[in-house]
Amino acid sequence: MRCPFCAHDDSQVKDSRPSEDGSAIRRRRQCTACGARFTTFERIQLRDLTVLKSEDRREPFDREKLLRSVAIACRKRPIPPGRVEQLVSGIQRQLETLGESEIDSQRIGEMVMEGLKGLDSVAYIRFASVYKDFREARDFEEFAGTVSEVARG
């Protein structure tokens, strides 16, 4: 593993343990050249996934991009810290076990919305506002009305 401080190609693993949610291995490493310590995370990847975007564009699935977008929707909400990570890990596992190497971005968006719906209604509406491209306040009102109806029903 390359050292992020001096770019030396060799480091020693000093400690390994599962991450909090069990979806990765957390490794503490020490550079053999400069002695700096750093942490890496190792995840299982079942297959390479490609995301089908609008206008027939394709891009590799980026877990960190998905994590950032969900984290933005959950910002300043009373959500336990590891819960967003668990949601994203669960979505990634679902995508990898679908058996398809190309996944439509809309399908990923629906999976995120489904996960956020059960987690936090405000985060759900925030994500939906970007995903569904709300343009006016009325769009928020209409969508929020459907969310509150589901919560009551």
Image (spheres, rainbow, N blue to C red):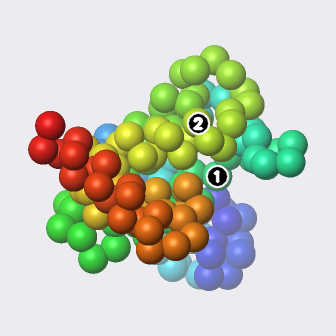
| Left or right for 19, reference 132 | left
Task: List the single residue furthest toward the right.
Answer: 56
Name the foreground residue: 124 vs 81: 124
Instruction: Look at the image and tell me whether residue 120 can be seen.
Output: yes
Q: In this view, does 70 lie above or below 100?
A: below
- Crowd around label 2: few <14 · some 14–19 · many ≥20 (10 Å): few
Q: Name the residue under label 1.
A: 62
Which label belongs to residue 141? Answer: none
Is disc 2 placed on a helix, strand or loop? helix
Q: In this view, does 134 lie above or below 143?
A: below
Indicate the quadrant where residue 7 lies.
bottom right
**Residue at the image position 32 percent from the left and 59 percent from the top:** 144
Is disc 1 placed on a helix, strand or loop? loop
- Alpha carbon separation for disc pair 2 and 1: 15 Å
User: Which of the marked residues, 2 or 1, is nearer the chain's N terminus?
Assistant: 1
**Residue at the image position 24 percent from the left and 70 percent from the top:** 77
CB within 8 Å, label 2 to label 1: no
- Nearer to us of marks 2 and 1 is 2
Image quadrant holding the C terminus, namely: top left
Q: Name the residue under label 2.
A: 107
Amino acid type, residue under disc 1 in the picture: Asp
